[in-house]
């Protein structure tokens, strides 16, 4: 039993995987760990059945080692510890203006193509990033979500001494808060779940319930940068409300349906609203540097580690409301 397959309608099975020999410019990996993220849970709810070709292996937050190298691959050799930046950008067109990570023909590995919830995974070599020697592969599996946070903070242009408000204290929101604090910003987190607020406070972050007096907590001038990570109507209204004059509002969450926006706030305070989607190679490198540096204490983010064979039951538990920050799947177990 070496791979988890999604069959549509929220159904998963565990079975034998196929060890695909790498072609030219490809690398075959022995997957160590794969994190379960919100996108995976959306797939498990059946919300992305129109996009995922079944049966398919999903998952994209991974770490592992190089097992086999195809022709023309340079810079990687068997045994190297690596992570995958799961974006197949080979469909880039001139209309993408050089931003292949958000290109029209972008394919996301683990959604549009087979992913990492398997023992052996063959990927394009250009998606790989080296992990420094000695980095725990469990922490390496956090590189992908941490790269999201690094990209978001970079899009927000967070500067030392600024106030950064993070609306939504889930996995990505918490990582954004930690990266923004590493940039020497004053960081506040708004999160309705008591357990997530408690975890944020364990990291030394100021965390508040949405019903708290947020204006008093943030200060009269507001936050120079606000990250909307909740995906809620209340969240986007709070983002413009609590932004400072000429503040930046970074929309991180996915809003599948239109939500009311207080355009008066944009006009009155000359706000900027910026989107932030996935990451670029430099964000992965920044994330890996932070992991290797150890200053973020990312071990606290990992809720638990489950064996591959437990994945179908794990998704059932998460859909039923199991509380978790970041669960890793041990693809070797």
Image (cartoon, helix red, strand yellow):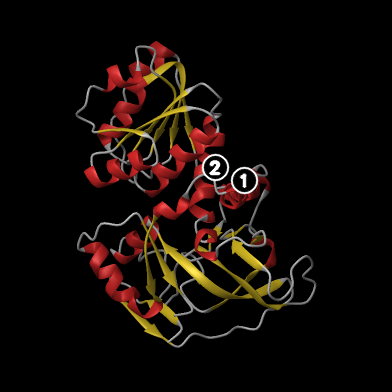
Is 115 left or right of 200, judged from the image as shown?
A: right
User: Can you say which quadrant of the picture contains the C terminus?
Assistant: bottom left
- Kindly identify which numbered label has been placed on residue 150: 2
Identify the element where label 2 is drawn. helix
Q: Is residue 33 visible?
A: yes
Measured as percent of width and height from the top left, residue 199 is found at: 32, 45
Tell me what residue is drawn at x 48 percent, y 66 percent: 110
Q: CA distance from mark 2 to mark 1?
A: 7 Å
User: Can you say which quadrant of the picture contains the N terminus?
Assistant: bottom left
Does 299 sit above or below residue 282? below
**Residue beneath label 1, please?**
286
Measured as percent of width and height from the top left, residue 258 is found at: 31, 38
Q: Is residue 115 visible?
A: no
Is 35 left or right of 290, judged from the image as shown?
A: left
Measured as percent of width and height from the top left, residue 226 is found at: 41, 28
Give the quarter of the image for residue 167. top left
Tell me what residue is drawn at x 55 percent, y 60 percent: 140
Disc with the residue nearer the chain's start (2 vs 1): 2
Graded by Cα atoms within 10 Å as few (under 14), some (14 to 19) or many (20 or more), the crowding at tag 1 reads some
Identify the element where label 1 is drawn. helix
Disc 2 vs disc 1: Cβ atoms closer than 8 Å? yes
Q: Nearer the viewer, residue 103 or 246?
A: 246
Tell me what residue is drawn at x 62 percent, y 48 percent: 289
């Amino acid at each position: 039993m070496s791979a988890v397959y999604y069959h549509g309608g929220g159904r998963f099975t565990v079975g034998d995987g196929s060890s695909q020999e790498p072609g030219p410019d490809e690398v075959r990996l022995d997957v160590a760990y794969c994190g379960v993220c919100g996108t995976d849970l959306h797939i498990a709810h059946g919300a992305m059945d129109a996009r995922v070709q079944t049966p398919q292996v999903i998952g994209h937050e991974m770490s592992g080692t190089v097992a086999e190298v195809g022709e023309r691959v340079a810079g990687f050799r068997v045994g190297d510890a690596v992570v995958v930046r799961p974006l197949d950008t080979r469909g880039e067109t001139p209309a993408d203006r050089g931003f292949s990570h958000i290109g029209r023909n972008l394919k996301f590995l683990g959604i549009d193509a087979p992913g990492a919830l398997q023992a052996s995974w063959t990927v394009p070599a250009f998606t790989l990033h080296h992990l420094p020697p000695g980095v725990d592969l469990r922490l390496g599996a956090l590189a992908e979500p941490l790269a999201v946070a690094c990209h978001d903070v970079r899009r927000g242009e967070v500067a030392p001494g600024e106030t950064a408000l993070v609306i939504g204290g889930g996995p990505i929101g918490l990582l954004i808060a930690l990266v923004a604090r590493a940039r020497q910003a004053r960081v506040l987190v708004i999160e309705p779940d008591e357990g997530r607020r408690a975890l944020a406070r364990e990291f030394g972050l100021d965390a508040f319930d949405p019903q708290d007096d947020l204006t008093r907590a943030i200060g009269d001038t507001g936050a120079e940068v606000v990250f909307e990570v909740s995906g809620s109507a209340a969240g986007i209204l709070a983002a413009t409300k609590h932004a400072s004059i000429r503040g930046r509002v970074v929309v991180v969450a996915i809003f599948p349906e239109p939500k009311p926006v207080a355009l008066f706030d944009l006009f009155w305070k000359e706000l900027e609203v910026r989107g932030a989607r996935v990451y670029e190679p430099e964000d992965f490198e920044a994330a890996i540097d932070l992991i290797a540096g150890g200053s973020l204490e990312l071990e606290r983010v990992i809720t638990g580690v489950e064996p591959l064979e437990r994945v179908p039951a794990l998704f059932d538990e998460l859909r039923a409301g199991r509380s978790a920050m970041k669960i890793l799947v041990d693809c070797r177990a």
